[in-house]
Image (spheres, rainbow, N blue to C red):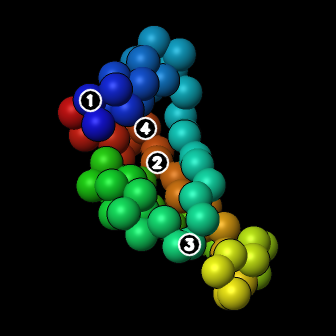
Amino acid sequence: MSGLISLLEFTFNELNLYKVYLRVFSFSERAIKLYQKLWFYKEGELKEQVYRDGEWHGVVFMGLLKRNYKE
């Protein structure tokens, strides 16, 4: 997790970007919880994008604004 925090620090402090976003499959519950701990929030979901283990799953979009990033 420290690698991801370092990447966020570089993104916001060195590159001076205002927003970072990511995509994650909806069945990746552990990953979603991790991103939420890092202050990412769910912005939306594309339903039924991947078929896995006999079910359709979505793709979740999550974002983090620079003003919401906590060190």
Q: Where is residue 9 in the image (x, y as percent from the top left)?
A: 36, 24
Residue 66 visible in the displayed image: yes
| Mark closer to the chain start, 3 or 4 | 3
Amino acid type for the residue under numbered disc 1: Ser
Q: Which mark is residue 64?
A: 2
Q: Are marks 2 and 3 in contact (CB under 8 Å)?
A: no
Q: In this view, does 42 lie above or below 18?
A: below
Q: Where is residue 43 in the image (x, y as percent from the top left)?
A: 57, 66
Q: Position of residue 71 (x, y in %)?
A: 22, 33
Q: Are marks 2 and 4 in contact (CB under 8 Å)?
A: yes
The residue under the point 32% across, 31% down is 5
Q: Is residue 63 above or below residue 58?
A: above
Q: Is residue 46 above or below residue 10?
A: below
Element carrying mark 3:
loop
Distance CA(mark 2)–CA(mark 3): 18 Å
| Mark closer to the chain start, 1 or 4 | 1
Residue 47 visible in the displayed image: no
Q: Which of 29 and 20 is in front in this view?
A: 29
Q: Label 1: which residue?
A: 2
Amino acid type for the residue under numbered disc 3: Ser
- Disc 1 residue crowd, few under 14, some 14–19, many 20+, Cα 10 Å: few
Q: Do the residues labelled 3 and 1 touch (CB within 8 Å)?
A: no
Q: Where is residue 16 in the image (x, y as percent from the top left)?
A: 51, 20
Q: Nearer the viewer, mark 2 or mark 4?
A: 2
Element carrying mark 2:
strand
| Mark closer to the chain start, 2 or 3 | 3
Q: Label 3: which residue?
A: 26
The residue under the point 64% across, 80% down is 53
Amino acid type for the residue under numbered disc 4: Lys
| Mark closer to the chain start, 3 or 1 | 1
